[in-house]
Amino acid sequence: MSRRLLDPTLALDAALRLAGRGVAVFPLAGKVPAIRGGRGVLDASTDLTVVRRWWANGYPGANIGARVPADLVVLDVDPRNGGLAGMRELLGERRRLPETLTVWSGRDDGGRHLYFRRPPGRLTQRGLPAGVDLKQSTGYCVVPPSLHPDTGKPYRWENHPPAELPAWLVPVLVEVPTQATARPARRWSAPRSGSVVDAFNATTSWRHVLEPHDWRVVRGDGDADRSAWRHPSATAPVSATITGGRLYVYTPNTPFTPTEPGAPRGYSRFEAWALLEHAGDQAAAARSLRSTGATA
């Protein structure tokens, strides 16, 4: 697959417009992060100086990845994985979705990203059918005028204000804990001396870190070498594996930077937990462990 590039001026102008409206962006090679050794979606920035440097000098003509804003969610409809049938299943005969901000995929197969106002509460995609995924602020979307890496055709905006989720869809996406099903807070005792990070890595399991975010073990016990994990929105059977106690992620559309041949990127338990629970702010994660002992 050859890398398709935008007109550099067009790409720069589009990236600056988005960043100027408060949407954090970062350069993509096709649909994956272009910054080697970076932090994936966590590199996304609204700093116009940084954005200009990326698209004017470092990655001219690169596609644009936009981190999902914290006040929005995205329904990602992927026809290659049954998304069109999934939408028919989700809607049934009588339900309709309101007009909302939409990005149509350059694959030209009906794939699209539907942006909605984020409802309050903890979100889940477990109630969504195959081919329809939920993206939140820990993820990103390809945005226009990016070119699809397979077809070379541009992604396209369908401009409407982001709509509220219809009332019937909110219970599908929002977890409603009950006394019987609420997940109890997980506690962890900080050591009286020594490194809180080292202690966390030594005493916490990968299940403790990943399962609250709907990752599932698909091979092994989850902690031993060669154990495999699957991300809730993954289309491949394996999203990450454990080697030497570290998590190596292969799918690009997660908060983690994917590992690459020649540039392996593994995460310790603490690094992964800080990314999932504190948006990568390891200092805040360590303070939370020291002050409350709460890990979820």
Image: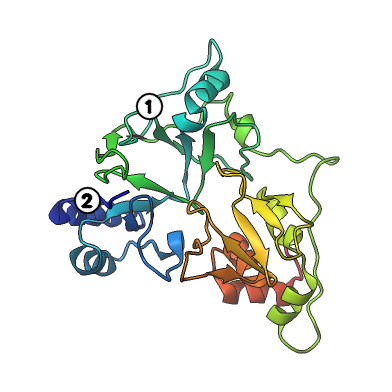
Q: Identify the residue shown where x is 63% and y is 41%.
A: 124
Which residue appears farthest toward the top when viewing the image? 93
Give amino acid for label 1: Gly
Helix, strand or loop at disc 2? helix
Q: Identify the residue shown where x is 48% and y is 54%.
A: 252
Helix, strand or loop at disc 1? loop
In the image, is residue 263 above or below residue 133? below
Tell me if I can see residue 45 in this picture: yes
Q: Nearer the viewer, mark 1 or mark 2?
A: 1
Give the distance between the C-alpha atoms of the residues marked 1 and 2, in whole angstroms.
23 Å
Residue 29 location (% of width, % of height) = 33, 56
Q: Identify the residue shown where x is 80% and y is 39%.
A: 178
Give amino acid for label 2: Ala
Contact, CB < 8 Å: mark 1 with mark 2? no
For marks 1 and 2 on the same chain, the one whose residue lies earlier in the sequence:
2
Q: Identify the residue shown where x is 43% and y is 71%.
A: 37
Q: Nearer the viewer, residue 150 or 118?
A: 150
What is the crowding at mark 2: few (fewer than 14 residues within 10 Å), some, or many (at least 20)?
some
Residue 133 location (% of width, % of height) = 53, 37
Which residue is tagged 1? 110
Residue 272 location (% of width, % of height) = 62, 65
Left or right of 10: which side holds 49? right
Q: Quadrant of the C terminus?
A: bottom right
In the image, is residue 121 above or below residue 24? above
Residue 291 location (% of width, % of height) = 72, 75
What is the crowding at mark 1: few (fewer than 14 residues within 10 Å), some, or many (at least 20)?
some
In the image, is residue 165 above or below residue 280? above
Q: In the rendered structure, find residue 14 and report the number of the disc placed on it.
A: 2
Which residue appears farthest toward the bottom when viewing the image? 193
Q: Nearer the viewer, residue 172 or 105?
A: 105
